[in-house]
Each structure stands twice: as C-alpha cells, then as structure tokens.
Image (tube, rainbow, N blue to C red):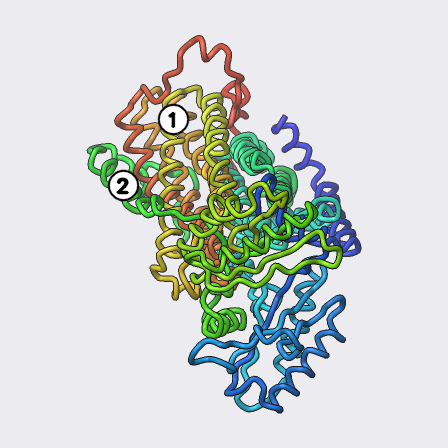
Amino acid sequence: MLRSLARTCYHRRWYVLGLWVLLLVGLSVASGAAKGEYKDEFTLPDSDSQDAIDFMEAHGFANEAGFGGKIGDVNDPAVRGAMEGLFAQFDENLPATHVVSPYEEGNEHQISSLEGTAGTIAYAEVQMADRDANDLMDDGEEGRLLAEAVDVPGLQIELEGYQFAEMAEFGSESIGFLAAIIILLIAFGSVLAMGLPLMTALFGIGTGIAIVGLAVNVIDMPSFSEQSVLMIAIGVGIDYALFIVTRYREGLHNGMSPEQAVVTAIDTSGRAVLFAGTTVIIAVLGLFAMGMSMMNGLAIGISIGVLMTMAAALTLLPAVLGFVGHNIDKLGLPHRKRREGATKESFWFRWSHFIQRNPWPPLIGSAAVLILIAIPVFSLRLGWGDAGNFPDDNTNRKAYDLLSTGFGPGFNGPFLLAADISGGDSAVAAVEGLANTLRQTPGVAEVDGPIVNATGDGAIINLFPDTSPQDEATDKLVHHLRNDVVPGAIDGSGADVWVGGFNPAGLDFANYMGGRLPLFMGVVLILSFILLMAVFRSLVVPLKAVVMNLLSIGAAYGVLVAVFQWGWGKDLIGVGKAGPIDAWVPMMLFAILFGLSMDYEVFLLSRIKEDYDKTKDNANAVANGLAATARVITAAAAIMICVFGAFVLGDDRSIKLFGLGLAVAVLFDATIVRLILVPATMELLGDRNWWLPKWLDRILPVIHVEAHPDDQPESGHPAPATAD
C-alpha cells in the first residue's frame, strides 16, 4: 500500500501539493471564523471538592479573584479615593464583574490586623462570572492596565489570579524552528535538504492546529492545548520528514532513480514513521482511561497534531521530492563530506564495535547513571502549582507575598466548606457548631462563617490554614478535616458538608491521577510490548525496549522532582519557588514519551533487523544498524530537545514542567539508551535477541516496519553525480 501511495504522490505531485495548500488555507480560514473557545474547567468525579463546587454553584456562591495594596495606612484619604475609583472602573469596564471592597461596612476583615502589618495591607475580592478562557485573559489584561494607571505615592497594587498573570509574549516555537534549521543544516549539509522537513512539518502543524481550532467548538479543551499541540507536532513533524529525506538521499547515492528512491524511502522509513506515529496516537488516546474531560480534549488535540504531521510526511513529502529529484544536494555546505549509507568508515560504526568489544562496563555504568538520576522520583509529591511559583517580579507573586505577609501564609489557599442545611434547625446548629470546632482545630488560623445563602438551604465556611497551600502540613489538615473533624461535628444532624477550595481540589486531583496512573502505565506498557513483539518477531527485544524506556522516563521524572520540587537550579529556568509536581504532568509525559521513544526504537531496531535477516550476524547487524541511523537519530533528538527546551523559557509553570520533562527524556533516550545500552545489551544477548516461540510466531499478526524482502525495489541505474 505504501509503495502505491508513494508512486501516486510522486506522479501526481502537482495535485497533491495543490490539495495540501487548499487544505491548509481552507482549514485555517474556517478555524478563524469559528472562533472556538478553550475552557480550563474540569470535573473530578466522586470527590469532596467537586461536590463542594457543584453545591456552591447551585446555591448562588460566587468564585473570586483578588488584588492587594500596601501603604502606611490603607485608610489614608488619597489611598482610599484612588482604590474606590479603581473598584468602580473594574465594575464598569469588565463585564459581569463585581468588586467586594474592604471599605464597605462589614468587610473590615479584608484589612490586615496582624501585628506589624495592621492597617497597611488590604485586599478586595473581584467576583467574575463564568466566561471562556480567552475572554477571561482579555479581561485580566484590561484589569491589569487599569491597576497600573493608578499613581499614588507609596501605594502598591498587585493582582492575584491566573487571568492577571503577566505572561510575556514569547515565541518558543520560533526558537525551536531556528534550532531545527541549524541542526538540519549540520546534519544534511544542504540548504535544500534542510528545507524539506521544515516545509513538510509546517503544513502538517498548520492543518493540525486549524483542525484543533475547529474541534474546540465541540470538544472541551484546556487553554494550553494549542501550545501542547505545537510543542509535540513541531518535534515529531520535523523528525518524521527527516527520517524519510535521509533514506531518500541514501537511495539516490546508491544509484536509484528519484522515483525508486522515493518509493524505497516511503516503503522503509515511511513504514517506521507510520508505526511510530500511530503508536504516539494510541498512547496519547490512552488518556481516556483517566476519565477526565479536560484530559480527553488534550489527548484529542495532540493526536490530531501528530496525525496531520504524519500524513504530511507520507503524502506531501514524496510529492515535493518529485519536484526536487537529484537536486536534493544542491546548495551544499563545505562541511559535507560523506554520502548517506557509507557506514563502515563512520565514527558510529567504530563506536558500536568499541561498546561491543567489552559491553559490561558501559552497560552497568549507563544503567547506573539513569538509576541515580531517577532516585528523586521516590520523593515525588503530586499537587498543583499556585501564584507562589511565579518569579518574584510577577504581579501574581507579589500579591501572593503581600497576602501572606498581611494575613498569614494560609490565606492564599483558603478552604471552602460547603454545607447543605436544608435538613432544618438541627442541621443549622450542627454547622454552627462545626465552625466553632474548626476554630479550635490545630493548623487552622482563622474561620469565617457560616455564611447562609438567600434561600436558607445552604451555607459556606471560609477556613484559612496556618500553612501555605503547597505545604505538606496543609494536605494533612485536609485529611484530618474530612476524616475526623467534619464527620464528628455533623453526625446525625441531617447536614451534609463538603471540604473544597484550591488546596483540597488539588489534593483530590492528585489522588485521582495517582490512583489511575499505574493502570494507565500498565496498559501502555503491555500494548507497546505486543506491538514491538509483532514487528520484530521477538520476545527479548520488546522486553528490553520497555525496560529501557522506563529507565529514561524515570530519569526524566527524577530531574523534574529535583528542579521543580526540590528547587535545584529553579532560578535558571525562571521558577520562583519550589512546589509539588502538577498532577497531570507525569501521566501526560508517560503517554507522549512512550510514543516518542518508539521513533528511535523502531528506526534503529528496524535497520538492525533488516541487516540481521540478510546476514544472520548479530554483532555486525547491530554495528551497521547503529552506523546507519545514529546520525539521523542524533539530529532528530537534538531537534526535539531544542523544540521542547525552548518552551522551558516561557512563563507558564505547567508548560515549563512539560517541556523540561520531554527534553531531558529525549536526551537520555537518544544518547544513553540508544547509543550505549542498546548495542551493549544486544551484543550480550546475541542471537537470543530474536528468539520467539514458534507457537507465538504463528498467532501474532505480521507487521512489517521495513519493506518486506519480497517487495524490495530493484536496484536502479547509476544516478548522475551529486555534490557531496
């Protein structure tokens, strides 16, 4: 099928190119016209915090953001006049917004009374009705501009809430593309060969992003979906095209005609691309097992991006190669000396034999390095970042610090206890008694309420812990309240009480994800094992691949814990304060990394298997396979590392986590694993690498990643000389 597809795209190249141009333009226009809205809301089934949210929404309790100000006296006439004017502008200029002022009667608690800061710090609550993520960010920017316009000597106004965060416009994807250009120039030594993977990736990414923009109209996706899709699609899109272009040039240099080289490239490297891309999509769609709509939407978005880049590599690229023909090496650079396929005199051929001569030391040493780097994962604490993780100069961080100074560290993460008091006087009395009990509970700094709604059937209690939201003691307080304090206070009263708020919700989310992660990882591991077993007709190769992938992913988790949770080197990447690892990151990283690792696994092992099937010489097959693929694997990995690493330079902590995890995992996978562990273990195992019981061989489906031997194209006539 792939051979026919390649020939069709080659001969009908004008039609294929025209269709892709129409597809890109049409989808982009349609996506812009549809104006889909991203949503950061998510529901966490069967959790106390979700029940609290649902109850509060149903009974008229509003969500809040806030801002704080600091001066010698918040009641100074100049300060009060400026702030009340600002509150009025918020009410007037931001739709469906209401400001609860500290100057209103009964709101004296919004002015600090702590010793040392009494009367110098105050906060106002900005109650914003539900709106989509784009509108929320637009209104946040407008609010920030209004606050910045207030000019009173000595007055400091800071805003807390994600919508007010000062997110710099930063083109991470541009840096990734620039790095890809440089790496491809070094790898190919030709301007034209460099441009083909980039052009193919741009078409795939552009159509993928446009489809995601349309899909968001019918599927809930978080606001960072587009950035995540870009991150993954840029990396895999360039890599997939790189694999195919490399094989095409090798075919030309071996004397094939351009058509034969295209067919061979698609029927060999194209098969690896199809298998690797499909594996990425399957792994990412496995996120549906987590049972969360937000994760489902993100999985669909990333899958669309990968699918379109894969489609561009398998259809658009062979069409464009038809235009290029023998000119692939035109505009060559001076450093290019060796042609594709000249492997035995290469550094990587000598490197493989160096590893294979005495494989035990490199095997033990490289495995020890990965295990050592992975050790911090045993201290992994899942949670959720907050404004305290922003850099010191961010308005969210400044507001966070002001509130901590004026009202205590727990003020930034209040608990909201939602109570159903429709059961009558006994329920009301029990909730009032609960509030008094909470005031005497260790770890509780302050309790406000109960505040009863207008219909008298619901109430909320605001509770402020005396520790910060990301402190482990705060998590322990949540468990203590839910397991001991609340049940004891309302037992037999007819009242129902749910403990919600930022910290309890983050804890519920972390527990939910942590509980499902082993099942999800098990499904991905088993599926990957079966697929690799069917492809390489071996039990040993897929088992080894699974273990090595776990080592590289574990090491990546270890780096994330060391940097983001322990704070090692956090200032180098712009993280303001150490904190827990966002609960969705390990699960998402595992899904994507296990899929991406298949790129290098399949590309390397398929070349080794191809050579082994011809010669039955395991040692030389390993050396030849590594020599034939190491340069392109190194280039592909370098591109991914630069693309993913560029996103670490942005402002969003979640994207930093995601980008760094992907970058270091690819680094470990493409260097320590592929270039040391693979040749060492395959040398030690010898022919046992390819052992498969006969009964299993009969029942397994046959999946060819490289071209079937019977289908290999005939050798072409010598090609015209090309600039090498």
Q: Secondary structure at mark 1?
A: helix
Q: 705 or 49, which lies in front?
A: 49
Which quarter of the image is occupied by the N terminus?
top right
Q: Secondary structure at mark 2?
A: helix
Residue at the (47%, 34%) spot, across then down: 521
Residue 23: in sight, yes or no? yes
In this image, 308 relative to 604: left or right? right
Q: Amino acid at mark 2?
A: Ser
598 lies above or below 449:
above
352 lies above or below 42:
above
Badge 1 is on which residue? 543
Q: Residues within 10 Å of mark 2 (few under 14, many from 20)?
A: some
Image label count: 2
Instruction: Report the Cα–Cα distance between label 2 and label 1.
Output: 18 Å
Residue 380 at what x, y percent from top left?
38, 47
Tell me, for residue 366, which label it has, or none.
Answer: 2
Q: Amino acid at mark 1?
A: Leu
